[in-house]
Image (tube, rainbow, N blue to C red):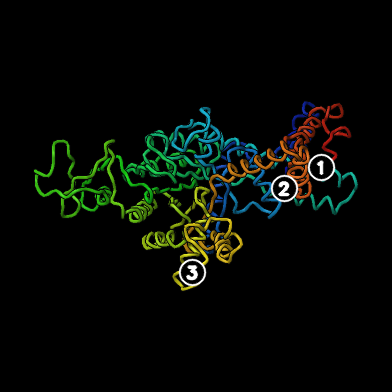
Amino acid sequence: MSQYMNEIEKITKLVTGQGSRWRSVNPDYVARMRIQNRFTTGLDIARYTARIMREDMAAYDQEPSKYTQSLGCWHGFIGQQKMISVKQHFGSCRGRYLYLSGWMVAAMRSEFGPLPDQSMHEKTSVPALIEELYTFLKQADARELTHLFRDLDAARDAGDEVRLKDVQNKIDDFESHVVPIIADIDAGFGNEEATYLLAKKMIEAGACAIQIENQVSDAKQCGHQDGKVSVPHEDFLAKINAVRYAFLELGVEDGVIVARTDSLGAGLTQKIPVSRVAGDLADQYNSFIDGDPVGSVNDVVPGDLVIRQGDRLIRPKRLANGLFRFREDTGEDRVVLDCITSLQHGADLLWIETEKPHIGQIAGMVDRIRKVIPDAKLVYNNSPSFNWTLNFRQQVFDDWKETGRDIQQYQRDQLMSPEYDDTKLAADADARIREFQARAAREAGIFHHLITLPTYHTAALSTNDLAKDYFGEQGMLAYVLGVQRREIREGLASVKHQDMSGSNLGDDHKEYFSGAQALKAAGEKNTMSQFA
């Protein structure tokens, strides 16, 4: 017996046991509603998606070609459409996640209006967006199953047993649009207790993976801007621990923590930690601080701070705002220490924020990390903050120059110019961009590739195109050609926007509840029938 039919049988016994009091309840309809709403809480989702992510991590350890991907989104509908599209084009959502970007929440979801990525937005908007995303993903499940149930009814009415069995199998084998979300908690929005409280809200909303960065919470900057200030390891590890406690308290034992280091671009620290034993974490952190040698008491003035670095004393260089500088040549060493320390103290995955997409640079750091922790894996930000075209054209230029190829027709500082778009160098660069994720997964330990802000840019671009032509000479043709006809030709479910909003699902429910007297929206006067 199929799972669907087994569910009907169980509910039939339940309803029958109530005698005539539940005579208007149809067990088949109850079974359908249960199947359409398999996740009753956010914790159900978090546990389910955490298992998926752990399985994907294990698969990647066995075979690096099995890396995963995600796209960032700032609204439930955007996330829903991504997964519907993935399922439509690839038949499965496996290995495709969603990313919740703190940058996008700040820029698109704050009641203050657009904000920079500096943790100034309402922290409650983060779990609210997680809940919204999963609401829309669950609705995608319900909608697709609604159509399967209607196909089932049609097969029954036609007495088509072969088709009936086929549809039952599709219902039993249905793959949910609910996928893991890697959720950005920034630097924790406060101290470790604040981090714990917010992590709980995010997990209760459905988050199975939380990404946290090693910046100072109240001085947090976007990962691709200047002025970043890192915290000592003890402070960061306390927040990782807080997130783990939140996962365990809520029973999400497979919860994933992504430890992000911004040390490659963070040249400042807010405080100097106390070292208790030579070589401890605080001592290692302090070894990177820039300072002037101290030979005697005469080299210091009242209020100066003096620390020991190995066999010498230094006076750390302090800015007017009280922050301390790291030596300029220490970024990669600090990244490696950050990553090893995070994995040794509870993190599951790493995120190294870089200034450019360069496999050699990433692999060089990962190789050092893997000498200590062989199964270290990364989440990598394929950021729109990088000029991908320019970066990869320059990488090709440098490689060609090193290998003696003719580069006379190219000017390295002008490679973004459109005049180079149809050149062999540009074609080589585009090929490297296309291969970047697979190569980085294989050569640089990247388990998960994400783009943080794709729909911010796609919304801007598509709106620009529509506005330019609609308010120009094309008028309504701009919408028909650029949007609706493409939706029809490419089979996008969104062309039937009433169905996407739940109209057909609501009609079915009305029939469940009211029977023949239900007032339904579907019918010959519903203009959505034009898109049959």
Inspect the image, locate mark 3, and give the three-letter code of the amino acid beneath it: Trp
Image location (x, y in percent) of residue 289: 26, 48
Classify 53 as above or below 45: below
Image location (x, y in percent) of residue 93: 64, 51
Image location (x, y in percent) of residue 309: 20, 51
Badge nearest the viewer, 1 or 3: 3
Residues at marks 2 and 1 touching, judged by CB atoms closer than 8 Å = no
Inspect the image, locate mark 2, and give the three-letter code of the amino acid beneath it: Gln
Q: Which mark is residue 150?
A: 1
- 260 relative to 500 in the view: left or right: left
* Residue position marked by numbered label 3 in the rendering: 400
Badge nearest the viewer, 3 or 2: 3
Q: What SS does tag 3 mark?
A: helix
Quadrant of the snapshot with the C terminus: top right
Q: Which mark is residue 3?
A: 2
Image location (x, y in percent) of residue 176: 66, 46
Mark yes or no: residue 16 visible. Answer: no
Inspect the image, locate mark 1, and give the three-letter code of the amino acid beneath it: Arg
Badge nearest the viewer, 2 or 1: 1
